[in-house]
Image: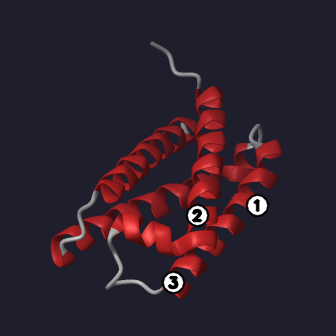
Amino acid sequence: MAFDVEKELKIFWIAAILVVIFYGAWLFISYESYNAIMDAGRHFSPVLGRIIGAIFIAWVVILIMLYKKLDNWENIEHWVLFAVIVNILILIAFILGIVMYGILTMGVIIAMIVNIFFAVLGIHIWIQKRE
């Protein structure tokens, strides 16, 4: 089965916009509810959570602006690599949180699955486009 990398890239990009705006808005607007679901109360402050939400919202603005340039790989290659690195680092942070602090909730598991999906898809796209 042949992969259509251009189609996968658009799916990756649109899905990333939706997921990042969801988490960004949630963290920025109501960090307390996110904190309750993730059970990370003793580890993070509401200010830190809102800062991360603000960074995610800024990231979405860039993703939306770059959507028009998906046909030019040179314009977006570094952003795809950035997304892969961020997802891998977030996954490592979750693993450290589970091992060191015992933070294991359904929210963490779902977030880990989302990060694995985006990391694997991003790596696949990046490798295919580099060839």
Asked whether 115 or 78 is in front, the reply is: 115
Which disc is residue 46 wearing? 3
Residue 105 drawn above or below residue 29? above
Could you tell whether 103 is left or right of 47 in the image? Answer: left
Residue 46 drawn above or below residue 1? below
Query: Residue 21's x, y, as percent?
Result: 64, 56
Query: Residue 29's x, y, as percent?
Result: 63, 71
Q: Of the residues shown, which amino acid type is indicated by label 2?
A: Trp
Say whether marks 3 and 1 touch (CB < 8 Å): no
Disc 3 secondary structure class? helix
Q: Residue at x 72, y 54 (%)?
A: 63
Q: Residue at x 21, y 68 (%)?
A: 98
The local crowd at label 2, few if under 14, some if 14 to 19, many if 20 or more residues have their Cα within 10 Å, is some
The C terminus: image quadrant: top right
Q: Of the residues shown, which amino acid type is indicated by label 1?
A: Val
The local crowd at label 1, few if under 14, some if 14 to 19, many if 20 or more residues have their Cα within 10 Å, is few
Query: Residue 5's x, y, as percent?
Result: 59, 29
Which callout, 3 or 1, points to the residue nearer the camera? 3
How far apart are the alpha carbons under marks 2 and 3?
12 Å
Query: Residue 34's x, y, as percent?
Result: 46, 67
Q: Find disc 2 in the rendering and name its residue.
A: 26
Which disc is residue 101 wearing? none
Q: Of the residues shown, which amino acid type is indicated by label 3?
A: Pro
Q: Find disc 1 in the rendering and name its residue.
A: 61
Asked whether 110 or 73 is in front, the reply is: 110
How far apart are the alpha carbons under marks 3 and 1?
23 Å
Q: Earlier in the sequence, mark 2 or mark 3?
A: 2
Could you tell whether 5 is left or right of 112 in the image? Answer: right
